Image: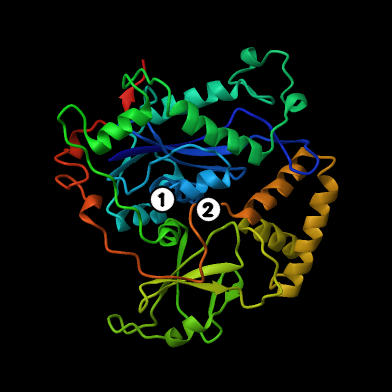
Amino acid sequence: AVVQIDHTRVDIVLVDDRTRQPIGRPWLTLAVDVFSRMVAGYYLSFDDPSVTSVGLCMAHAILPKEEWLIMHDVEAEWPVWGFPAKVHVDNGPDFQADDFKRSCAMYGIDVDFRPVRTPRYGGHIERLLGTLMKEVHGLPGTTFSSVPHKGEYDSDKHAALTMAEFEKWLVHFICKVYHESLHRGIGMAPIQKWKQGIFGHAGLPGSEVPSRPSDRHTVLLDFMPSFKRTVQRTGVEIEGLKYYAEALRPWINYVDPVTGGKKKFLFRRDPRDVTVIWFRDPDLEGYVKVPVADQSLPPMSLWEYREIRARLKQQGISRASSLDLAHAHKELTEIVERASEKTRKARRMAQRRKEHARKKSPAPDPAVVQKPEPQTETQGKKGSSLFGDVDFDAIEPYEEIE
C-alpha cells in the first residue's frame, strides 16, 4: 500500500572484476514496504542517483523476483510484487522530476514528498538503511560511518568484493537474514508480517495476492526517461543520434488532428545503452524497439556518449559522425583500460561500463512490447479489494526518529 524510497552511498569500497583493485563505493536505491518492512526493491550502481536509479528501483519493486533470485544464485523467497498505492520520497531532483511523477500517475500511484526543512523527521527507509549499513561494516573494505569508527582501518587495502559479489551478498542478506529476522518495530519477522497482510490473520481479512504485471518490460520502460519527438523521413534524433525502424514509417510527418501541427510521439531510453530507444506506438499501444540508424556504432552508456562528444568538441568536431564516435569510443576504452591498473577513477569508469553493458534488469528485452493488460481492481486506492478500507490520507508519511 505504502512504499518509501531513498538513496545512500554504501559504506564499502568494492574492487573491479579484472584487477581486483579498489574502485570506490557504490550507490544503493532502496524501497521498503511500510506495513511489513519488507524490502520491495532496490537498484545498485556506481552511477550517482538519478531518475534512472529511481525508475529501475520502482520497476524492481513492482515486478516478481523469481528470475532475479536465480540470476544472483540465491535460493530464497521474495514474494513482493504489485503496484503500490502511494510512494513516500524526499525532495531530491530525481524524485521531483516530471518523468517520475508521470510514470507513477500512469499506474495510479500517489507521490508524497517529505516536508521541507524537517531534518528531525525520518522514515522507515532511513532505519532500514541504517540496519543495512551496520551489516556492511562487517565486510572487508568497509568505510564505516565515521572517522572515529574507522580508526586505523585501511578500506582500500582490505577491499575484496566485486560489484557482482557484493550484490549477491546484498540479495542473500535481504531475503535470508533481514526478511526472516525479528523486527522490533512490528514484533515479528517482515516476511511473517507480509504474509499476514496478504492472507489475513486473527480474523482480519488479508489484501489478497497482488496481480502479477502482465508485461514486465512495459513496466520497466514506463519508468525510464522519456522524450517527445516528431518523426521525420530519417527517423528521430535525440542528443545528436539518429534512430530509425520501419515501425516509424506510418508516422513520418504525421499531423495531429487536434492541434493541426506535427504530432510529437513518446520515446523512452535506458541510459545504460544509448544505441536503442523505444517508441510508444499509438496503434499497438505498446513499445517498439528502435535502433540507432548507423549500426556500426558500438553500445555505450549515456555518460560515455556525453564524455566522447565533449572530447570531440575539444578537438573542434561539433557535428560528430558515427565513425568519429566509434573511433573516439574505442580510444576512450583503451585509455581507461590502460589507466585502470594505475588509477582508482579509471578502474571505476571501466567497471561502470561493464555494469551498463550487462544491463541487469527484472524484465526481458523483446523487440516489441505489446499493450499491457488494463489495471485490475487490485491496483486501486481506498476501498479496493487489495487495500480494503484503508484511508491513505490518515497514514503518516514519516515517523520521528528518537
Q: Residue at x 35, y 33 (%)?
A: 116
- What residue is shown at x 47% (from left), y 59% (from top)? 225
Are there few (<14), some (14-19), or many (20+) residues within 10 Å of tag 2?
A: some
Disc 2 is placed on an element classified as: loop
Of 150 and 385, the residue lying toward us = 385
Residue type at tag 1: Leu
Numbered label attached to residue 361: 2
On screen, residue 89 versus residue 162, left or right, reads left
Q: Is residue 386 left or right of residue 95?
A: left
Q: Residue at x 29, y 84 (%)?
A: 257
Q: How is the image coloured?
A: rainbow
Q: Determine crowd level at label 1: few under 14, some 14-19, many 20+ residues with C-alpha closer than 10 A.
A: many
The residue identified by callout 1 is 63
Residue 173: where, in percent of width, then height?
A: 52, 30
Instruction: Give how far across and how far down residue 254 sits, in percent.
Output: 40, 85
Residue in front for this viewpoint, 132 or 309: 132
Residue 13 image point, x, y percent: 68, 31
